[in-house]
Image (cartoon, rainbow, N blue to C red):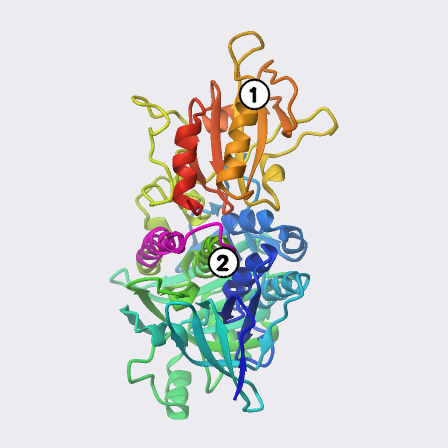
Amino acid sequence: MVHTRTPDVLVAGAGPVGLTAAAELRRRKIACRIVDRLPARLPYAKAVGIQPRTLELWDRMGLVRAVLDAAVPMRGQLTYVNGVEQPRIDLVLPPEVPYGFAALPQYETERILEEFLAGFGTRIERGTELLSFAQDADGVTSRLVDSSGSEEEVRSRYLVGCDGAHSTVRKGLGLGFEGGAFPEEYMLADVEVGWDLPHGYGVRAMHRAADGSVDDVLVCIPLPGPGRYRMSMTVPAELSAARKADRPEPGGGEVAHGLEGGVAPTLAHIQTVLDRLSPRPTTADAMRWSSVFRISHRLVDRYGRGRVLVAGDAAHIHPPTGAQGMNTGIQDAFNLAWKLALVVEGTAAGRLLDSYDAERRPVGAEVVGRTVRHAAAGIQADPADPATVMLREAQLLVGYRGSPIVGRPGDDSPSVVPPGPQAGDRAPDCAGLTTEIACYPLRLYDLLRGRGHVLLLYDGEDEGDGGQDTRGFDELAALATTLSHGRVETCVLLGGRACVGTTLLPVYRDARGEFARAYGARGPSAFLIRPDGYLGSRLTPPDGRRLAGHLAQVFQP
Protein backbone atom coordinates (compact mmCIF):
# COMPACT_ATOMS: atom_id res chain seq x y z
CA MET A 1 0.00 0.00 0.00
CA VAL A 2 1.27 3.46 -0.92
CA HIS A 3 1.37 6.01 1.90
CA THR A 4 1.01 9.68 1.03
CA ARG A 5 0.40 12.91 2.92
CA THR A 6 -0.48 15.59 0.42
CA PRO A 7 -3.75 17.45 0.93
CA ASP A 8 -4.96 19.67 3.70
CA VAL A 9 -8.47 18.54 2.77
CA LEU A 10 -9.64 15.36 1.05
CA VAL A 11 -13.05 15.67 -0.63
CA ALA A 12 -14.91 12.43 -1.34
CA GLY A 13 -17.43 12.80 -4.17
CA ALA A 14 -17.21 14.93 -7.33
CA GLY A 15 -20.81 15.91 -7.89
CA PRO A 16 -21.84 19.59 -7.79
CA VAL A 17 -21.47 19.66 -3.98
CA GLY A 18 -17.98 18.19 -3.80
CA LEU A 19 -16.81 20.25 -6.77
CA THR A 20 -18.07 23.46 -5.17
CA ALA A 21 -16.28 22.62 -1.92
CA ALA A 22 -13.02 21.78 -3.71
CA ALA A 23 -13.20 24.83 -5.97
CA GLU A 24 -13.75 27.24 -3.09
CA LEU A 25 -10.92 25.64 -1.11
CA ARG A 26 -8.53 25.86 -4.05
CA ARG A 27 -9.65 29.42 -4.83
CA ARG A 28 -8.54 30.23 -1.30
CA LYS A 29 -5.18 28.44 -1.89
CA ILE A 30 -5.89 25.39 0.28
CA ALA A 31 -4.25 22.12 -0.83
CA CYS A 32 -7.08 19.76 -1.73
CA ARG A 33 -7.67 16.42 -3.42
CA ILE A 34 -11.04 15.33 -4.76
CA VAL A 35 -11.82 11.68 -5.55
CA ASP A 36 -14.81 9.99 -7.11
CA ARG A 37 -15.48 6.30 -7.59
CA LEU A 38 -17.05 6.79 -11.03
CA PRO A 39 -14.69 6.53 -14.02
CA ALA A 40 -16.35 9.46 -15.80
CA ARG A 41 -19.03 12.10 -15.39
CA LEU A 42 -22.50 10.58 -15.76
CA PRO A 43 -24.37 11.93 -18.83
CA TYR A 44 -27.67 12.23 -16.94
CA ALA A 45 -29.83 15.31 -16.45
CA LYS A 46 -30.53 14.50 -12.80
CA ALA A 47 -30.63 17.69 -10.72
CA VAL A 48 -31.47 20.44 -13.21
CA GLY A 49 -32.86 23.43 -11.29
CA ILE A 50 -30.44 26.19 -10.24
CA GLN A 51 -31.71 28.66 -7.66
CA PRO A 52 -30.91 32.39 -7.63
CA ARG A 53 -29.05 32.04 -4.32
CA THR A 54 -26.72 29.44 -5.82
CA LEU A 55 -25.99 31.78 -8.73
CA GLU A 56 -25.12 34.50 -6.22
CA LEU A 57 -22.56 32.20 -4.59
CA TRP A 58 -21.08 31.24 -7.94
CA ASP A 59 -20.90 34.95 -8.76
CA ARG A 60 -18.86 35.47 -5.58
CA MET A 61 -16.51 32.68 -6.74
CA GLY A 62 -16.19 34.13 -10.24
CA LEU A 63 -17.71 31.33 -12.31
CA VAL A 64 -21.30 32.45 -12.82
CA ARG A 65 -20.82 33.69 -16.38
CA ALA A 66 -20.09 30.17 -17.63
CA VAL A 67 -23.33 28.95 -16.02
CA LEU A 68 -25.37 31.78 -17.54
CA ASP A 69 -23.97 30.96 -20.98
CA ALA A 70 -25.05 27.30 -20.70
CA ALA A 71 -28.36 27.42 -18.79
CA VAL A 72 -31.90 28.23 -19.85
CA PRO A 73 -34.30 30.43 -17.87
CA MET A 74 -37.03 28.94 -15.71
CA ARG A 75 -39.88 31.42 -16.08
CA GLY A 76 -42.60 29.57 -14.24
CA GLN A 77 -44.86 26.54 -14.14
CA LEU A 78 -47.95 25.50 -16.06
CA THR A 79 -50.27 23.25 -14.07
CA TYR A 80 -53.04 21.00 -15.36
CA VAL A 81 -55.46 18.94 -13.30
CA ASN A 82 -57.54 16.36 -15.17
CA GLY A 83 -56.73 18.23 -18.36
CA VAL A 84 -57.91 21.62 -17.07
CA GLU A 85 -55.35 24.41 -16.94
CA GLN A 86 -54.85 25.96 -13.51
CA PRO A 87 -53.55 29.47 -12.72
CA ARG A 88 -50.05 29.91 -14.09
CA ILE A 89 -47.18 30.31 -11.63
CA ASP A 90 -44.68 32.94 -12.75
CA LEU A 91 -41.27 32.88 -11.08
CA VAL A 92 -40.96 36.60 -10.39
CA LEU A 93 -38.51 38.06 -7.90
CA PRO A 94 -37.91 41.63 -6.68
CA PRO A 95 -35.94 43.75 -9.17
CA GLU A 96 -32.93 44.09 -6.86
CA VAL A 97 -32.30 40.31 -6.97
CA PRO A 98 -29.53 39.91 -9.58
CA TYR A 99 -30.39 36.43 -10.88
CA GLY A 100 -33.51 34.51 -11.78
CA PHE A 101 -34.27 30.80 -11.79
CA ALA A 102 -32.40 28.62 -14.26
CA ALA A 103 -32.26 25.04 -15.54
CA LEU A 104 -29.15 23.13 -16.57
CA PRO A 105 -28.46 19.37 -16.83
CA GLN A 106 -26.38 18.18 -13.89
CA TYR A 107 -23.60 16.93 -16.14
CA GLU A 108 -23.22 20.46 -17.53
CA THR A 109 -23.12 21.93 -14.03
CA GLU A 110 -20.41 19.43 -13.16
CA ARG A 111 -18.48 20.21 -16.35
CA ILE A 112 -18.42 23.93 -15.56
CA LEU A 113 -17.34 23.36 -11.98
CA GLU A 114 -14.72 20.82 -13.02
CA GLU A 115 -13.21 23.21 -15.56
CA PHE A 116 -13.19 26.01 -12.98
CA LEU A 117 -11.46 23.73 -10.49
CA ALA A 118 -8.89 22.68 -13.11
CA GLY A 119 -7.94 26.35 -13.44
CA PHE A 120 -6.42 26.06 -9.96
CA GLY A 121 -4.40 23.01 -10.96
CA THR A 122 -6.68 20.42 -9.33
CA ARG A 123 -8.35 17.59 -11.22
CA ILE A 124 -10.80 14.94 -10.14
CA GLU A 125 -9.16 11.61 -9.37
CA ARG A 126 -11.72 9.43 -11.09
CA GLY A 127 -12.19 5.73 -10.55
CA THR A 128 -10.91 6.24 -7.01
CA GLU A 129 -13.07 5.14 -4.10
CA LEU A 130 -12.87 5.93 -0.40
CA LEU A 131 -12.89 2.59 1.41
CA SER A 132 -12.51 3.68 5.03
CA PHE A 133 -10.98 6.33 7.26
CA ALA A 134 -9.83 6.89 10.81
CA GLN A 135 -9.30 10.21 12.52
CA ASP A 136 -7.20 11.34 15.45
CA ALA A 137 -6.41 14.65 17.11
CA ASP A 138 -4.14 15.80 14.28
CA GLY A 139 -5.81 14.56 11.11
CA VAL A 140 -7.56 11.85 9.12
CA THR A 141 -6.08 8.72 7.53
CA SER A 142 -8.10 7.53 4.52
CA ARG A 143 -7.82 4.34 2.50
CA LEU A 144 -8.41 4.80 -1.22
CA VAL A 145 -8.53 2.24 -4.02
CA ASP A 146 -8.27 3.05 -7.73
CA SER A 147 -9.72 1.25 -10.73
CA SER A 148 -6.69 -1.04 -10.98
CA GLY A 149 -7.17 -2.24 -7.41
CA SER A 150 -4.14 -0.37 -6.07
CA GLU A 151 -4.66 0.97 -2.57
CA GLU A 152 -3.36 4.23 -1.20
CA GLU A 153 -3.30 5.60 2.33
CA VAL A 154 -3.80 9.35 2.44
CA ARG A 155 -3.19 11.55 5.44
CA SER A 156 -5.14 14.84 5.44
CA ARG A 157 -6.05 17.39 8.05
CA TYR A 158 -9.77 17.15 7.20
CA LEU A 159 -12.10 14.87 5.24
CA VAL A 160 -15.30 16.16 3.63
CA GLY A 161 -17.93 13.63 2.56
CA CYS A 162 -19.89 14.80 -0.46
CA ASP A 163 -20.47 11.20 -1.49
CA GLY A 164 -24.24 11.12 -1.76
CA ALA A 165 -27.17 9.37 -0.16
CA HIS A 166 -25.20 6.15 0.34
CA SER A 167 -22.25 8.03 1.84
CA THR A 168 -19.27 6.02 3.05
CA VAL A 169 -18.23 9.01 5.14
CA ARG A 170 -21.58 9.29 6.92
CA LYS A 171 -21.64 5.56 7.63
CA GLY A 172 -18.03 5.60 8.82
CA LEU A 173 -18.84 8.38 11.28
CA GLY A 174 -21.85 6.44 12.56
CA LEU A 175 -24.14 9.43 12.11
CA GLY A 176 -27.86 8.97 12.57
CA PHE A 177 -29.86 9.35 9.35
CA GLU A 178 -33.47 9.18 10.40
CA GLY A 179 -36.44 9.42 8.07
CA GLY A 180 -38.37 7.23 5.70
CA ALA A 181 -38.95 6.28 2.08
CA PHE A 182 -41.80 6.95 -0.31
CA PRO A 183 -43.27 3.71 -1.66
CA GLU A 184 -43.61 4.97 -5.23
CA GLU A 185 -41.06 4.50 -7.97
CA TYR A 186 -40.62 7.21 -10.60
CA MET A 187 -39.31 7.29 -14.14
CA LEU A 188 -36.93 9.96 -15.39
CA ALA A 189 -36.30 10.64 -19.06
CA ASP A 190 -34.52 13.28 -21.14
CA VAL A 191 -36.60 13.69 -24.32
CA GLU A 192 -37.78 16.17 -26.92
CA VAL A 193 -41.42 16.99 -27.64
CA GLY A 194 -43.11 19.17 -30.23
CA TRP A 195 -45.84 20.92 -28.27
CA ASP A 196 -46.47 24.68 -28.50
CA LEU A 197 -46.33 25.45 -24.76
CA PRO A 198 -44.50 28.63 -23.72
CA HIS A 199 -40.71 28.41 -23.64
CA GLY A 200 -39.08 28.37 -20.22
CA TYR A 201 -42.05 27.02 -18.29
CA GLY A 202 -42.13 23.76 -16.43
CA VAL A 203 -45.20 21.59 -16.82
CA ARG A 204 -47.00 19.71 -14.04
CA ALA A 205 -49.96 17.62 -15.23
CA MET A 206 -51.91 15.60 -12.65
CA HIS A 207 -54.93 13.37 -12.49
CA ARG A 208 -57.08 13.50 -9.39
CA ALA A 209 -59.24 10.55 -8.43
CA ALA A 210 -62.81 10.89 -7.20
CA ASP A 211 -61.59 11.18 -3.61
CA GLY A 212 -59.30 14.10 -4.54
CA SER A 213 -56.05 12.16 -4.29
CA VAL A 214 -53.45 12.44 -7.06
CA ASP A 215 -53.07 9.07 -8.75
CA ASP A 216 -51.08 10.08 -11.84
CA VAL A 217 -48.53 12.82 -12.42
CA LEU A 218 -46.19 14.16 -15.11
CA VAL A 219 -43.54 16.80 -14.36
CA CYS A 220 -41.48 18.35 -17.17
CA ILE A 221 -38.54 20.73 -16.66
CA PRO A 222 -37.15 22.59 -19.70
CA LEU A 223 -33.55 21.95 -20.71
CA PRO A 224 -31.27 23.63 -23.26
CA GLY A 225 -32.37 22.69 -26.78
CA PRO A 226 -35.60 22.98 -28.79
CA GLY A 227 -38.50 21.21 -27.10
CA ARG A 228 -36.16 19.39 -24.71
CA TYR A 229 -37.36 18.45 -21.21
CA ARG A 230 -36.39 16.26 -18.32
CA MET A 231 -39.60 14.42 -17.53
CA SER A 232 -40.57 12.50 -14.40
CA MET A 233 -43.62 10.30 -13.87
CA THR A 234 -44.73 7.27 -11.91
CA VAL A 235 -43.51 3.84 -12.98
CA PRO A 236 -46.16 1.64 -14.61
CA ALA A 237 -47.04 -1.64 -12.91
CA GLU A 238 -45.56 -3.85 -15.64
CA LEU A 239 -42.20 -2.07 -15.55
CA SER A 240 -42.13 -2.18 -11.75
CA ALA A 241 -42.77 -5.92 -11.82
CA ALA A 242 -40.03 -6.47 -14.41
CA ARG A 243 -37.59 -4.45 -12.32
CA LYS A 244 -38.37 -6.37 -9.14
CA ALA A 245 -37.66 -9.59 -10.99
CA ASP A 246 -34.41 -8.11 -12.32
CA ARG A 247 -33.04 -6.88 -9.00
CA PRO A 248 -33.90 -7.21 -5.31
CA GLU A 249 -35.45 -4.46 -3.23
CA PRO A 250 -33.08 -2.45 -1.04
CA GLY A 251 -32.60 -4.05 2.35
CA GLY A 252 -30.33 -4.21 5.35
CA GLY A 253 -30.80 -0.54 6.18
CA GLU A 254 -29.84 0.62 2.68
CA VAL A 255 -31.24 4.03 1.75
CA ALA A 256 -33.69 3.83 -1.17
CA HIS A 257 -32.91 7.13 -2.86
CA GLY A 258 -31.72 8.19 -6.30
CA LEU A 259 -31.23 6.49 -9.65
CA GLU A 260 -31.48 2.73 -9.72
CA GLY A 261 -30.10 0.09 -12.05
CA GLY A 262 -31.99 -2.73 -13.68
CA VAL A 263 -34.62 -2.51 -16.40
CA ALA A 264 -34.87 1.10 -17.70
CA PRO A 265 -37.96 2.81 -19.16
CA THR A 266 -38.27 2.84 -22.93
CA LEU A 267 -39.55 5.62 -25.12
CA ALA A 268 -42.83 3.70 -25.33
CA HIS A 269 -43.23 3.94 -21.55
CA ILE A 270 -42.75 7.70 -21.71
CA GLN A 271 -45.14 8.09 -24.63
CA THR A 272 -47.87 6.17 -22.80
CA VAL A 273 -47.78 8.69 -19.95
CA LEU A 274 -47.76 11.61 -22.39
CA ASP A 275 -50.81 10.17 -24.12
CA ARG A 276 -52.61 10.16 -20.77
CA LEU A 277 -51.47 13.44 -19.25
CA SER A 278 -49.84 15.77 -21.80
CA PRO A 279 -51.74 19.07 -22.06
CA ARG A 280 -51.19 18.96 -25.84
CA PRO A 281 -51.05 15.94 -28.14
CA THR A 282 -47.35 15.33 -28.69
CA THR A 283 -44.79 12.67 -29.51
CA ALA A 284 -41.65 12.09 -27.46
CA ASP A 285 -38.46 11.69 -29.45
CA ALA A 286 -34.66 11.77 -29.20
CA MET A 287 -34.46 10.14 -25.77
CA ARG A 288 -30.95 10.70 -24.40
CA TRP A 289 -31.36 8.57 -21.28
CA SER A 290 -33.93 7.18 -18.89
CA SER A 291 -33.91 5.64 -15.46
CA VAL A 292 -36.02 4.82 -12.43
CA PHE A 293 -35.49 6.58 -9.14
CA ARG A 294 -36.70 6.25 -5.57
CA ILE A 295 -37.21 9.01 -3.02
CA SER A 296 -36.49 9.03 0.70
CA HIS A 297 -36.47 11.82 3.26
CA ARG A 298 -33.73 11.74 5.87
CA LEU A 299 -31.50 14.10 7.84
CA VAL A 300 -28.28 13.43 9.76
CA ASP A 301 -28.23 14.09 13.48
CA ARG A 302 -25.09 16.21 13.03
CA TYR A 303 -23.10 17.49 10.06
CA GLY A 304 -19.84 15.99 11.16
CA ARG A 305 -17.64 14.90 14.00
CA GLY A 306 -14.14 16.11 14.69
CA ARG A 307 -12.17 16.50 11.48
CA VAL A 308 -14.70 14.69 9.27
CA LEU A 309 -17.76 16.50 7.90
CA VAL A 310 -20.60 15.78 5.48
CA ALA A 311 -22.49 17.92 2.97
CA GLY A 312 -25.24 17.56 0.39
CA ASP A 313 -27.04 14.23 0.01
CA ALA A 314 -24.66 12.70 2.53
CA ALA A 315 -26.40 14.93 5.10
CA HIS A 316 -29.96 15.34 3.82
CA ILE A 317 -32.18 13.73 1.20
CA HIS A 318 -35.75 14.60 0.29
CA PRO A 319 -38.19 14.87 -2.63
CA PRO A 320 -36.92 16.88 -5.62
CA THR A 321 -39.86 19.30 -5.33
CA GLY A 322 -38.73 22.85 -6.06
CA ALA A 323 -35.18 21.84 -7.02
CA GLN A 324 -33.98 22.33 -3.45
CA GLY A 325 -31.60 19.39 -2.98
CA MET A 326 -28.54 20.15 -5.11
CA ASN A 327 -28.77 23.84 -4.30
CA THR A 328 -28.95 23.20 -0.56
CA GLY A 329 -25.92 20.94 -0.87
CA ILE A 330 -23.94 23.51 -2.83
CA GLN A 331 -24.65 26.06 -0.12
CA ASP A 332 -23.56 23.51 2.52
CA ALA A 333 -20.29 23.16 0.64
CA PHE A 334 -19.65 26.88 0.36
CA ASN A 335 -20.49 27.51 4.02
CA LEU A 336 -18.06 24.79 5.06
CA ALA A 337 -15.29 25.61 2.59
CA TRP A 338 -14.64 29.22 3.61
CA LYS A 339 -14.52 28.18 7.26
CA LEU A 340 -12.23 25.24 6.56
CA ALA A 341 -9.93 27.53 4.60
CA LEU A 342 -9.54 29.93 7.52
CA VAL A 343 -8.92 27.08 9.97
CA VAL A 344 -6.40 25.30 7.74
CA GLU A 345 -4.38 28.46 7.11
CA GLY A 346 -4.35 29.21 10.83
CA THR A 347 -6.29 32.47 10.82
CA ALA A 348 -9.25 30.92 12.67
CA ALA A 349 -9.52 28.43 15.49
CA GLY A 350 -10.94 24.94 14.92
CA ARG A 351 -14.06 25.89 16.88
CA LEU A 352 -15.17 27.95 13.86
CA LEU A 353 -16.20 24.64 12.27
CA ASP A 354 -18.80 24.15 15.02
CA SER A 355 -20.81 26.89 13.33
CA TYR A 356 -21.18 24.71 10.21
CA ASP A 357 -23.60 22.35 11.94
CA ALA A 358 -25.21 25.21 13.86
CA GLU A 359 -25.97 27.10 10.65
CA ARG A 360 -26.63 24.42 8.07
CA ARG A 361 -28.45 21.63 9.91
CA PRO A 362 -31.52 23.83 10.65
CA VAL A 363 -31.58 24.71 6.96
CA GLY A 364 -31.47 21.02 6.02
CA ALA A 365 -34.29 20.24 8.45
CA GLU A 366 -36.48 23.01 7.02
CA VAL A 367 -35.85 21.91 3.42
CA VAL A 368 -36.61 18.25 4.17
CA GLY A 369 -39.86 19.14 5.92
CA ARG A 370 -40.99 21.62 3.27
CA THR A 371 -40.26 19.40 0.27
CA VAL A 372 -42.09 16.48 1.88
CA ARG A 373 -45.15 18.72 2.39
CA HIS A 374 -44.94 20.06 -1.16
CA ALA A 375 -44.57 16.56 -2.59
CA ALA A 376 -47.85 15.63 -0.92
CA ALA A 377 -49.90 18.77 -1.57
CA GLY A 378 -47.99 20.87 -4.10
CA ILE A 379 -46.32 24.23 -3.67
CA GLN A 380 -49.70 25.87 -4.23
CA ALA A 381 -50.77 24.58 -0.82
CA ASP A 382 -48.05 26.58 0.97
CA PRO A 383 -49.83 28.90 3.46
CA ALA A 384 -47.35 31.76 3.04
CA ASP A 385 -48.09 34.67 0.71
CA PRO A 386 -46.92 34.14 -2.91
CA ALA A 387 -44.03 36.61 -2.66
CA THR A 388 -42.64 34.85 0.42
CA VAL A 389 -43.07 31.44 -1.20
CA MET A 390 -41.10 32.62 -4.22
CA LEU A 391 -38.26 34.05 -2.14
CA ARG A 392 -38.09 30.86 -0.07
CA GLU A 393 -38.02 28.62 -3.15
CA ALA A 394 -35.21 30.82 -4.51
CA GLN A 395 -33.42 30.15 -1.20
CA LEU A 396 -33.10 33.89 -0.63
CA LEU A 397 -34.65 33.66 2.85
CA VAL A 398 -31.99 31.32 4.23
CA GLY A 399 -30.33 33.07 7.15
CA TYR A 400 -28.23 32.48 10.25
CA ARG A 401 -29.62 34.73 12.95
CA GLY A 402 -28.66 33.20 16.27
CA SER A 403 -25.51 31.60 14.86
CA PRO A 404 -22.59 31.59 17.31
CA ILE A 405 -20.46 33.57 14.85
CA VAL A 406 -22.79 36.45 13.94
CA GLY A 407 -23.85 39.46 15.94
CA ARG A 408 -27.33 39.78 17.39
CA PRO A 409 -30.06 42.11 16.04
CA GLY A 410 -29.85 45.32 18.00
CA ASP A 411 -26.21 44.83 19.00
CA ASP A 412 -25.35 48.01 17.16
CA SER A 413 -27.84 50.06 19.15
CA PRO A 414 -28.78 49.75 22.81
CA SER A 415 -32.48 50.34 22.23
CA VAL A 416 -33.43 50.24 18.53
CA VAL A 417 -33.06 47.49 15.94
CA PRO A 418 -32.35 49.39 12.70
CA PRO A 419 -34.29 48.69 9.51
CA GLY A 420 -32.85 46.49 6.80
CA PRO A 421 -30.93 43.21 7.04
CA GLN A 422 -29.61 42.16 10.43
CA ALA A 423 -26.56 40.14 11.38
CA GLY A 424 -27.06 36.64 9.99
CA ASP A 425 -29.26 37.76 7.09
CA ARG A 426 -28.36 37.54 3.41
CA ALA A 427 -26.58 40.69 2.25
CA PRO A 428 -28.79 42.02 -0.57
CA ASP A 429 -27.43 43.36 -3.82
CA CYS A 430 -28.05 46.90 -5.03
CA ALA A 431 -27.10 48.98 -8.03
CA GLY A 432 -26.04 52.55 -8.68
CA LEU A 433 -22.58 52.61 -7.09
CA THR A 434 -20.11 54.91 -8.83
CA THR A 435 -16.46 55.92 -8.58
CA GLU A 436 -14.53 58.89 -9.88
CA ILE A 437 -12.90 56.66 -12.50
CA ALA A 438 -15.49 54.13 -13.72
CA CYS A 439 -17.92 55.74 -16.15
CA TYR A 440 -20.69 53.21 -15.46
CA PRO A 441 -22.65 52.26 -12.33
CA LEU A 442 -21.61 49.17 -10.40
CA ARG A 443 -23.58 46.68 -8.34
CA LEU A 444 -22.62 45.89 -4.77
CA TYR A 445 -21.95 42.29 -5.81
CA ASP A 446 -19.34 43.62 -8.25
CA LEU A 447 -17.43 44.91 -5.21
CA LEU A 448 -17.73 41.58 -3.40
CA ARG A 449 -16.80 39.27 -6.29
CA GLY A 450 -13.65 37.24 -5.70
CA ARG A 451 -13.19 38.53 -2.16
CA GLY A 452 -13.52 36.97 1.29
CA HIS A 453 -14.74 39.05 4.24
CA VAL A 454 -15.54 42.63 3.23
CA LEU A 455 -16.08 45.51 5.66
CA LEU A 456 -18.34 48.19 4.19
CA LEU A 457 -18.03 51.55 5.93
CA TYR A 458 -20.96 53.79 5.09
CA ASP A 459 -21.48 57.49 5.67
CA GLY A 460 -24.62 59.12 4.40
CA GLU A 461 -24.16 62.46 6.15
CA ASP A 462 -23.98 65.62 4.11
CA GLU A 463 -20.67 67.42 4.06
CA GLY A 464 -20.32 69.57 7.14
CA ASP A 465 -23.09 67.75 9.05
CA GLY A 466 -20.85 65.76 11.33
CA GLY A 467 -20.17 62.71 9.18
CA GLN A 468 -17.46 60.15 9.88
CA ASP A 469 -13.99 61.53 9.24
CA THR A 470 -11.27 59.84 7.23
CA ARG A 471 -9.18 58.91 10.24
CA GLY A 472 -12.07 57.03 11.82
CA PHE A 473 -12.59 54.92 8.71
CA ASP A 474 -8.88 54.29 8.25
CA GLU A 475 -8.53 53.22 11.88
CA LEU A 476 -11.44 50.78 11.60
CA ALA A 477 -9.99 49.32 8.41
CA ALA A 478 -6.56 48.91 10.03
CA LEU A 479 -8.15 47.22 13.06
CA ALA A 480 -10.08 44.79 10.86
CA THR A 481 -6.96 43.98 8.84
CA THR A 482 -4.88 43.31 11.95
CA LEU A 483 -7.43 41.20 13.82
CA SER A 484 -8.27 39.11 10.73
CA HIS A 485 -4.62 38.57 9.73
CA GLY A 486 -5.30 40.45 6.51
CA ARG A 487 -8.42 38.49 5.59
CA VAL A 488 -10.86 41.44 5.79
CA GLU A 489 -10.89 43.96 2.95
CA THR A 490 -12.51 47.36 3.46
CA CYS A 491 -14.51 49.58 1.10
CA VAL A 492 -16.05 53.00 1.81
CA LEU A 493 -19.57 53.86 0.59
CA LEU A 494 -20.72 57.48 0.57
CA GLY A 495 -24.27 58.75 0.32
CA GLY A 496 -25.56 62.28 -0.25
CA ARG A 497 -22.69 64.76 -0.33
CA ALA A 498 -20.62 62.96 2.29
CA CYS A 499 -16.87 63.27 1.93
CA VAL A 500 -14.17 61.37 3.77
CA GLY A 501 -11.25 63.40 2.49
CA THR A 502 -7.96 61.70 1.74
CA THR A 503 -7.84 57.93 2.22
CA LEU A 504 -6.19 54.95 0.59
CA LEU A 505 -9.37 52.91 0.99
CA PRO A 506 -11.51 52.22 -2.12
CA VAL A 507 -14.35 54.77 -2.16
CA TYR A 508 -17.71 54.32 -3.90
CA ARG A 509 -20.63 56.71 -4.11
CA ASP A 510 -24.16 55.47 -3.42
CA ALA A 511 -25.31 57.77 -6.20
CA ARG A 512 -28.98 56.75 -6.27
CA GLY A 513 -29.31 55.91 -2.59
CA GLU A 514 -30.00 52.23 -3.36
CA PHE A 515 -27.54 50.92 -0.79
CA ALA A 516 -29.00 53.16 1.90
CA ARG A 517 -32.52 51.90 1.13
CA ALA A 518 -31.57 48.22 0.85
CA TYR A 519 -29.56 48.22 4.07
CA GLY A 520 -31.54 50.72 6.11
CA ALA A 521 -28.40 52.83 6.41
CA ARG A 522 -28.82 56.42 7.57
CA GLY A 523 -25.88 57.71 9.54
CA PRO A 524 -22.37 56.27 9.70
CA SER A 525 -22.54 52.46 9.77
CA ALA A 526 -20.32 49.41 9.35
CA PHE A 527 -21.42 46.18 7.65
CA LEU A 528 -19.17 43.11 7.75
CA ILE A 529 -20.13 40.77 4.89
CA ARG A 530 -18.95 37.17 5.09
CA PRO A 531 -17.47 35.21 2.15
CA ASP A 532 -20.83 33.46 1.64
CA GLY A 533 -22.73 36.74 1.35
CA TYR A 534 -24.29 36.96 4.81
CA LEU A 535 -23.94 39.81 7.26
CA GLY A 536 -21.64 38.84 10.08
CA SER A 537 -22.21 42.10 11.91
CA ARG A 538 -23.68 45.58 11.46
CA LEU A 539 -22.67 48.47 13.68
CA THR A 540 -24.43 51.84 13.83
CA PRO A 541 -22.42 53.91 14.47
CA PRO A 542 -19.16 52.09 13.72
CA ASP A 543 -17.37 51.12 16.89
CA GLY A 544 -13.90 49.58 17.07
CA ARG A 545 -14.51 47.72 20.32
CA ARG A 546 -17.63 45.97 19.08
CA LEU A 547 -16.05 45.26 15.70
CA ALA A 548 -13.11 43.64 17.48
CA GLY A 549 -15.52 41.53 19.54
CA HIS A 550 -17.18 40.17 16.43
CA LEU A 551 -13.91 39.46 14.62
CA ALA A 552 -12.76 37.48 17.66
CA GLN A 553 -15.77 35.15 17.12
CA VAL A 554 -14.44 34.21 13.68
CA PHE A 555 -10.69 34.69 13.59
CA GLN A 556 -7.98 33.23 15.81
CA PRO A 557 -7.70 35.48 18.91
The count of marks equals 2
Does the stretch in magenta take in 485? no
Instruction: Determine the residue positioned at 63% across, 55% down.
Output: 67
- In terms of depth relative to the viewer, which is nearer, 513 or 264? 513
SS label for mark 2: helix
Mark 1 surroundings: few (<14), some (14-19) or many (≥20) residues within 10 A: few
Q: Which amino acid does label 2 sit on?
A: Val
Which residue is more in the foreground, 515 or 193? 515
* Disc 2/disc 1 C-alpha distance (Å): 34 Å
Examine the rendered structure and indicate whether residue 340 appears above or below residue 413. below
Q: In this view, does 144 lie above or below 404?
A: below
User: What residue does disc 1 label?
Assistant: 471
Secondary structure mostly seen in the magenta stretch = helix
User: Residue at 44% of width from left, 54% of height from top?
Assistant: 79
Question: Residue 496 appears at what percent x and percent y?
Answer: 58, 15
Say if 498 sits above or below 123 in the image: above
- Locate residue 139: give its quadrant: bottom left
* Figure quadrant of the C terminus: top left
Residue 362 belongs to magenta span: yes
Q: Where is residue 192 in the image (x, y as percent from the top left)?
A: 61, 68
Determine which residue is flagged by label 2.
344
Between 49 and 422, the one nearer to me in the picture: 422
Per the rendered image, the range of residues in magenta is: 344-370
Pick the residue in front: 301 or 112. Answer: 301
